[in-house]
C-alpha cells in the first residue's frame, strides 16, 4: 500500500511548502470488481425507480425537515443557495448497530447485502492506508487507526448525476473538501466529471473502471498538523450521460476531540489548528458547505 501511495503520488498529490495535498488513485485494492459493479448497478436501479418509491427512503422528516441520512438533495440553508445537480442516497454504515435501515432501499433486494459486504472491504482498505500514512508521518503505525473508537461513524454516499441540459450553469457537487479522516471514492466506470484543484487550476480526474480514489479529509489535515492537506474537489455535469459515484466517508466519534498529533509538534512547529470535538466540526462543516466555503479555514491558528 505504501508502494501504491508512492506510485500514485506521481499523478495527483501536490507538494507545497512541505505539505501534501493527497488524493491517491488505487487500482490493485483487492475488492472484487463484481462487487463494485453489482453495488453500483443496484444503486442505479434504485435511482431509476419512480420518485414515490425512492421517497420511502427520504432524507426529509414529514417532507420538510432535513436529516443527514436518506434519499434526496443536500440541505438548503438559504434561499439564494445554488443547488447542486444531483440526487443522493446517504446512509450510515458504521457502527453496524446504529444503521437506520428505514433509509436503506428494499428495492432492488440485493442492495443491502451488497452494501454491507462493500463496507467491510472498505474498512480493511482504510486501515491499511491509515497505517501507511501514520508511518509516512513518522508516527506509531497504529496512531491514526486507534483514533477510531467503536462509535466512529462511516457513511456511504451514492451520488447520482442525471444528464444536465446546462452544464455551464450548475455543478454536480460544488467545490469542497471532505470532512472526515479519509474518503474512499468509487468513480463511475465510464463517465468522468470529478475535478481536483491544484495550484489554482482544476484538473480532470480520468475515470477508469474499478479504480478507487482515496481522498484525505479535513480531520486528517488537522491530525497531521497540515502536513497532509485535504484536496478541494468538485464534480461537473454533462448534457449527455448520467453518472454515479459512491463515496465512503470515514469519520470519528462525535465526542472525539480532533487535534494535531502531539508527536508532530515542537517549538518550531506549533499546532496550526484549534482542537475541536468532531460533532462541533461537523456542524460548522455543513454550514460552510451550503455556502460554498471551507470550515477548515476558520479552525486554523
Ligand atoms: O462524484 C464524485 O466524483 C465526487 C463526489 C464527492 O466529492 C462527494 O460525494 O463528496
Ligand atoms: Fe467530496
Image (spheres, rainbow, N blue to C red):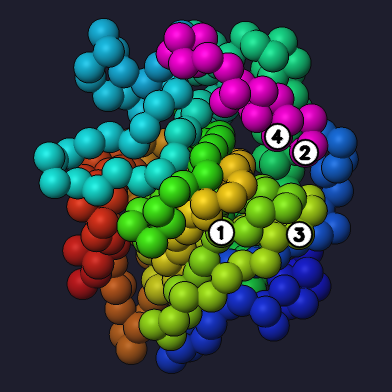
Regarding mark 2 in the picture, which secondary structure is present there?
helix
How far apart are the alpha carbons under marks 2 and 4? 6 Å
Question: Would you identify the image quadrant in which residue 85 lies?
Answer: top left
Point 57% across, 70% down: residue: 204
Q: Which residues are magenta?
A: 36-55
Ligand 1 has an atom within 8 Å of the beta carbon of the residue at disc 2: no
Regarding mark 4 in the picture, which secondary structure is present there?
helix
Ligand 1 has an atom within 8 Å of the beta carbon of the residue at disc 3: no
* The N terminus sits in image quarter: bottom right
Q: Can residue 42 be seen here?
A: yes
Magenta portion: prevailing SS class: helix
- Circle 4 sits on which residue? 40
Task: Point out the tag, 1 or 4, that comes first from the N-terminus.
Answer: 4
Q: Is residue 159 left or right of residue 65?
A: right
User: Badge 1, how many Cα within 10 Å: few under 14, some, many 20+?
Assistant: many
Labels 2 and 4 touching (C-beta < 8 A): yes
Amino acid at each position: 500500500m505504501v508502494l501504491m501511495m508512492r506510485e500514485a503520488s506521481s499523478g495527483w498529490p501536490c507538494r507545497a511548502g512541505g505539505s501534501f495535498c493527497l488524493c491517491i488513485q488505487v487500482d490493485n485494492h483487492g475488492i472484487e470488481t463484481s462487487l463494485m459493479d453489482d453495488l453500483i448497478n443496484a444503486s442505479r436501479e434504485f435511482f431509476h425507480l419512480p420518485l414515490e418509491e425512492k421517497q420511502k427512503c427520504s432524507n426529509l422528516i414529514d417532507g420538510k425537515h432535513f436529516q443527514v441520512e436518506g434519499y434526496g438533495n443536500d440541505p438548503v440553508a438559504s434561499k439564494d443557495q445554488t443547488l447542486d445537480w444531483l440526487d443522493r442516497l446517504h446512509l450510515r454504515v458504521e457502527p453496524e448497530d446504529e444503521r437506520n435501515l428505514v433509509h436503506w432501499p428494499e428495492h432492488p433486494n440485493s442492495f443491502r447485502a451488497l452494501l454491507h459486504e462493500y463496507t467491510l472491504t472498505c474498512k480493511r482498505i482504510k486501515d491499511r492506508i491509515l497505517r501507511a500514512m501514520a508511518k509516512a508521518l513518522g508516527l506509531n503505525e497504529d496512531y491514526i487507526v486507534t483514533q477510531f473508537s467503536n462509535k466512529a461513524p462511516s457513511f456511504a454516499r451514492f451520488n447520482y448525476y442525471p444528464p444536465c441540459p446546462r452544464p455551464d450553469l450548475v455543478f454536480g457537487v460544488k467545490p469542497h473538501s471532505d470532512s472526515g479522516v479519509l474518503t474512499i471514492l468509487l468513480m463511475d466506470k465510464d463517465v468522468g466529471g470529478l475535478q481536483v484543484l491544484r495550484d489554482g487550476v482544476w484538473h480532470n480526474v480520468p475515470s477508469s473502471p474499478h479504480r478507487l480514489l482515496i481522498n484525505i479529509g479535513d480531520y486528517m489535515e488537522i491530525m497531521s498538523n497540515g502536513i497532509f492537506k485535504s484536496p478541494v474537489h468538485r464534480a461537473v455535469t454533462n448534457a449527455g450521460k448520467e453518472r454515479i459515484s459512491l463515496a465512503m466517508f470515514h469519520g470519528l466519534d462525535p465526542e472525539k476531540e480532533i487535534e494535531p498529533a502531539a508527536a508532530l509538534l515542537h517549538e518550531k512547529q506549533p499546532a496550526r489548528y484549534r482542537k475541536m470535538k468532531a460533532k462541533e466540526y461537523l456542524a460548522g462543516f455543513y454550514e460552510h458547505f451550503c455556502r460554498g466555503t471551507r470550515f477548515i479555514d476558520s479552525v486554523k491558528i
